Amino acid sequence: MAKFVRNVGFALSGIGLAIRTQRHMQIHCVAAAIVVGLGLFLSLDAIRWSLIVFAIGLVVSAELINTAIEQAVDLASPERHPLAKAAKDVAAGAVLAAALVAITIGLLVLGPPLLALFS
């Protein structure tokens, strides 16, 4: 159990590092807070909340993996190299894909009740 708790501490430390040092992670966190606020305001049901939580988790996870890949590539190849660039670009593409999915989910889940509110 102690090892598990220690490993959770390492994971939380990594998340904290990404939030402190990665501008895009900070943007994702602000967007997530806005979406959660809208969800609370709109009193979403459990299914809609599960979609929102999934979307947030998808983007945050992709950003964390992207950050890890960027750090590892920088360590392994401090000079510019086409393969290093390719690895970073593909990892960034994964974040973009996750963000586009999250935006789509957000529009599908939050859009109708927001439109109804203002109609």
Image (spheres, rainbow, N blue to C red):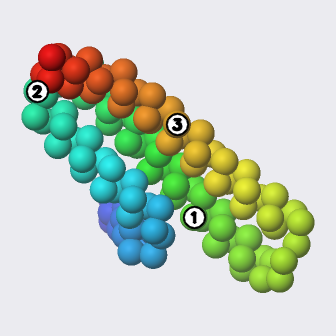
Q: Earlier in the sequence, mark 2 or mark 1?
A: 2
The residue under the point 31% across, 47% down is: 32
**Amino acid on which the number 3 mark rests in the picture:** Leu
Depth check, front residue: 50 or 118: 118
Q: Which marked residue is nearer to the observer: mark 3 or mark 1?
A: 3
Q: Quadrant of residue 88?
A: bottom right
User: In x, y percent, where is residue 94?
Assistant: 63, 45
**Amino acid on which the number 1 mark rests in the picture:** Thr
Q: Is residue 92 above or below residue 35?
A: below
Total residue callouts: 3
Tell me: 66 left or right of 118.
Answer: right
Q: Quadrant of the C terminus?
A: top left
Q: Residues within 10 Å of mark 1 (few under 14, many from 20)?
A: many
Q: Which residue is mark 3?
A: 100
Tag 2, which secondary structure? loop
**Amino acid on which the number 2 mark rests in the picture:** Ser
Q: Which residue is mark 1?
A: 67
Tag 1, which secondary structure? helix
Tell me: 38 left or right of 28.
Answer: left
Q: Earlier in the sequence, mark 3 or mark 2?
A: 2
Q: Is residue 77 above or below residue 69?
A: below
Tag 3, which secondary structure? helix
Depth check, front residue: 34 or 1: 34
User: In x, y percent, where is residue 118?
Assistant: 14, 23
Alpha-carbon span between mark 3 and mark 1: 18 Å
User: In x, y percent, where is residue 71?
Assistant: 64, 72
Is residue 14 among the parts visible in the rendering?
A: no
The residue under the point 44% across, 61% down is: 25
Q: Earlier in the sequence, mark 3 or mark 1?
A: 1
Q: Which residue is mark 2?
A: 43
The residue under the point 48% across, 70% down is: 22
Q: Quadrant of the N terminus?
A: bottom left
